[in-house]
Image (spheres, grey):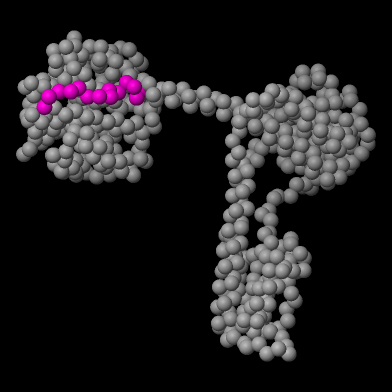
Amino acid sequence: MTHSIPDYIKLHTEETPVLPGLQTAAGDELTRLSSAFLEATGWSLHYQQQEDQQQEDARNLQPPATGDLAASVPVLDQAQQLLGEFLLEQAPTTSQEIPEMALPAATELATAISGLVSTLEQARETVWKQEAQLAASIPVSVRKDEETHLAARLESILRCGAEAIGCQAAAAYLLDDDTRYLKLRSCWGLPSQRLLDPPRPLQGASVDLEALVGHAVVLKDASCMPESLSEHTFPSAICVPISSPTVPLGTLWIFSDTDRTFNQQESNLVEMVAGRISAELEREVLLQQAITASLQERQWQHAMTWQENRLPRNPPLLTGWQIAAGTEQAQQIGGDFHDWTILTDNRLAVMVGDAAGSTIESALTTATVQASMRAHMDAMPRPGDLLNHVNHLLWTGCTGDQFASLFYAVIDESTGRLEYSGVGDVAGILLREDSFRWLHANPLALGTQESSEYETVVEQIQVGDTFVLFSEGLIAGHQQHDPREIEESLITLLRQLENATAHDIVQAMKQWGATPERDLSEEDQTVLVIRRTG
């Protein structure tokens, strides 16, 4: 079926942009190259550019062929597409005696020249593309003196565009979110009450539809104008699309009060005006997004600082004991934490926690757990009782979406008596000179059930022992290995650090856990080390 176009509608079809051909070399450079090659080898070498839109210009730069073709060497672009060829020909006879190089040697030299030119042209193409990309990377910012409202800027663009082609009115219609209607958003030369008109249905708006597919539509019949403008006598108009590089935004109409046509230059100018409108609209959106992102970034920084400040800085100074810890969040804010304090009965209390959930959710859960533990430590001296209480608080204080792993231990510094209770995915190791013991936690994390029976386990930390706690994120980068291999690797590492300080052990364990697989998994990690030295 043939698509017929009424004689009162004229289409200016926009051709698909193509990558322009790059001028490989200037004529004088080619001439000097050809002359030097002839004098050095006795062979004629000249460049012939690939047939394209610049063929005529290129032909004017190319010396005519003067002998029999002996070889041709291609010049390629970045996509390994042919830009042109170097033609090696038998030199014409001259009165001057020129020693002739053997053909294989001359061909090899021509190939080397072609490779250099190919590399040069590829570099020029890279710079050409990168400069355009850099032009698009200019940050969007609000100037202090920028007080002109978007409405005024759009109306000014419409006025300048209409006056540039000798027209008397212009209107910008933008699509709604469902792309069902076109609403007049800005106009010049029309009564301002037109902005109050209801939106026009896109269905049936043949001129707008034709424009939205990429055509510039010229009208010479007032009956094709939008109904909202039917009372105005505009015998001719041009309609072009307003669009971003990927999304159609609406249509731009420019009206003339005389019966006229629009040539290709005027059509191109109107399309440039539509592009300027699109740029202003997108810039306004980017400005709002930039402002919102800036506010969110400041809030994020405040939250990150707040969470970091909740972590203890300096460990307690206990004679015969070393204490160190480190927590790293995968995304600056996360669900891991460590803490320590001296209880009222002079025992040392330490904990390592790991909350489940997304970045913000886990951080909030962490804050809840840490605050609850701090508030009830002295009132509940047995670790199991305290974890049961915190579990009850989580279960009753949320909708069942807050879960946390926690290892809590209290140590009598004078006797080395260790009491602990662990739940979830936080693990512990008690390393002795000739043995070690894994202190595994109850698999049911805090907040997973209404009632819990977390027990208190008693151990003894002797002089020379090392007590280590760590969250699941430490071994996240080793999950591709068998669990037994992971345990053996970690124990081997700790054995190698028997004479190291607690701080050095923390750093070494964090480095052990910093594998490429962990970077991909984006897991928080915490390590806490206590050594009894005397």
Q: Give the range drawn in magenta.
A: 307-320
What residue do we see at 26% from left, 21% from top?
446
What residue do we see at 87% from left, 42% from top?
262
Identify whether 382 is placed above or below 116: above
Q: Residue furthest right?
A: 258
Residue 366 is a magenta residue? no
Specify whether 102 is left or right of 275: left
Q: Is residue 219 visible?
A: no
Identify whether 186 is placed above or below 121: above
Specify whether 144 is left or right of 499: right
Quarter of the image with the C terminus in it: top left
Residue 302 screen position, x and y as percent: 43, 22
Q: Quadrant of residue 461?
A: top left
Q: Main secondary structure of the magenta part?
A: loop
Residue 334 screen position, x and y as percent: 36, 27
Q: In which quarter of the image is residue 248?
A: top right
Identify whether 80 is placed above or below 400: below
